[in-house]
Image (spheres, grey):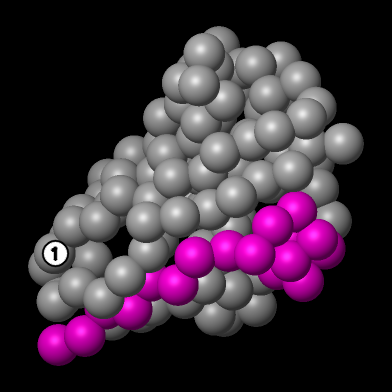
Amino acid sequence: EMHLVTSGGGSVQVGGSLTISCTASGGAFGDTEMAWYRSGNGCEILSTIGSHGRTWYALPVKGRFTVSRDNAKNMLSLHMKSLKVEDTALYYCAPVPASKVCDGYWGQGTQVTVSS
C-alpha cells in the first residue's frame, strides 16, 4: 500500500506563496490519480492530477493553486499563490479515490498558516 509523506508547510503572509510536496513509497504512484485535500472546513478536496497530468481544481483554489507531479521521483506538489487567511489548514495528499484522508490514514499532513 502507498505510504505518503507530506512536507513544505509553514507560515506565510496574506498574498504570499508556498509549495508543499508529497513523496510516495510503495504502491504504483505513477499509475495512480492523486489528490490534495485540506482539513479546516471539513475535509475538503482541492485538486486532482491524473497519471498523465490531467488536472482538476475546486473553485476556492482555482487560478491560485497549481498541482504537479514527477512520476520519476514519486512526488506530488502543490504550488499555492495569492494565499488567503482561509487557506490556513492541514494539507494532505492521497490517491483517488480515498477515505479517511483527514484522519491521517494516508500520512500526517503538513500545516499551512496564512496570517494578515
Q: Is residue 7 visible?
A: yes
In the rendered view, would you say 25 is above or below 39?
above
Q: Which residues are magenta?
A: 100-116
In the rendered view, would you say 11 is above or below 107?
below
Q: Position of residue 25 (x, y in %)?
A: 70, 33
Magenta-colored stretch includes residue 108: yes
The residue that appears at 23% across and 66% down in the rendered structure is: 83
The residue that appears at 49% across and 65% down in the rendered structure is: 110
Q: Position of residue 85 (x, y in %)?
A: 28, 81
* Residue in front for this viewpoint, 31 or 42: 31
In the rendered view, would you say 17 is above or below 57?
below
Query: Which quadrant holds residue 28?
Result: top right
- The three-letter code of the residue at mark 1 reads Gly
* Residue in front for this viewpoint, 2 or 85: 2
Disc 1 secondary structure class: loop
Seen in the image, is 100 located left or right of residue 91? Answer: right
Q: Position of residue 7 (x, y in %)?
A: 45, 55
Count all numbered tags in the image, as a single digit: 1
The residue that appears at 52% across and 44% down in the rendered structure is: 22
The residue that appears at 65% across and 16% down in the rendered structure is: 30
Q: In which quadrant will I find the C terminus?
A: bottom left
Seen in the image, is 35 located left or right of residue 102? Answer: left
- As drawn, the residue found furthest toward the bottom would be 116
Q: Residues within 10 Å of mark 1 (few under 14, many from 20)?
A: some
Q: In which quadrant will I find the N terminus?
A: top right
* Residue in front for this viewpoint, 70 or 51: 70
Magenta-colored stretch includes residue 115: yes
* Residue in front for this viewpoint, 51 or 75: 75
According to the picture, the residue beneath numbered tag 1 turns out to be: 16
